[in-house]
Image (cartoon, helix red, strand yellow):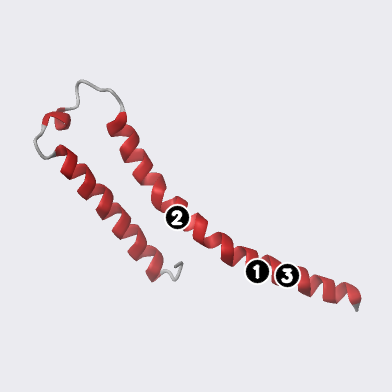
């Protein structure tokens, strides 16, 4: 009987930890593509034509914002947040 109670306790603790770990996982999943985009544009390339464009900086910010909104929407629809 004590062994069964211990199993129930450990199972409930594990479920609580899974719920808690879901939030950092979602945050990491949102920042991975943003880090990738920032990493590409943070390199010292000379032959990237979009670096010379007038609206390139704003364009990258818009792309990163759109990626974030899409991922947040996806996670909300999947009941992740």
Q: Which residue is mark 1?
A: 15
Q: Which residue is mark 2?
A: 27
Please tell me whether mark 2 or mark 3 is closer to you in this view: 2
- Find residue 55 and report its image quarter: top left
Q: SS of the residue at dot 1?
A: helix
Q: SS of the residue at dot 3?
A: helix
Q: Are marks 2 and 3 in contact (CB under 8 Å)?
A: no
Q: Are marks 3 and 1 in contact (CB under 8 Å)?
A: yes
Residue 27 percent coordinates (x, y): 45, 55
Is residue 48 rendered to the left or right of residue 28?
left
- Number of other residues with Cα within 10 Å of mark 3, as a class: few under 14, some 14 to 19, many 20 or more: few
Q: Which mark is residue 69?
A: none
- Number of other residues with Cα within 10 Å of mark 2, as a class: few under 14, some 14 to 19, many 20 or more: few
Q: Earlier in the sequence, mark 2 or mark 1?
A: 1
Is residue 36 rendered to the left or right of residue 48?
right
Residue visible at 57% across and 60% down? 21
Residue 13 percent coordinates (x, y): 70, 68
Is residue 9 rendered to the left or right of residue 39?
right
Residue 64 percent coordinates (x, y): 27, 48
Q: How far is disc 2 from disc 3 in space, using C-alphas?
A: 25 Å
Q: Which residue is mark 3?
A: 11
Q: How far is disc 3 from disc 1 in space, using C-alphas?
A: 6 Å
């Amino acid at each position: 009987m004590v062994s069964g109670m211990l199993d129930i306790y450990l199972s409930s603790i594990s479920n609580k930890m899974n719920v808690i770990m879901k939030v950092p996982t979602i945050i990491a999943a949102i920042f991975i593509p943003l880090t990738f985009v920032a990493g590409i544009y943070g390199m010292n390339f000379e032959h990237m034509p979009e670096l010379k464009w007038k609206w390139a900086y704003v364009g990258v910010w818009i792309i990163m914002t759109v990626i974030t909104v899409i991922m947040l929407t996806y996670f909300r629809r999947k009941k992740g947040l």
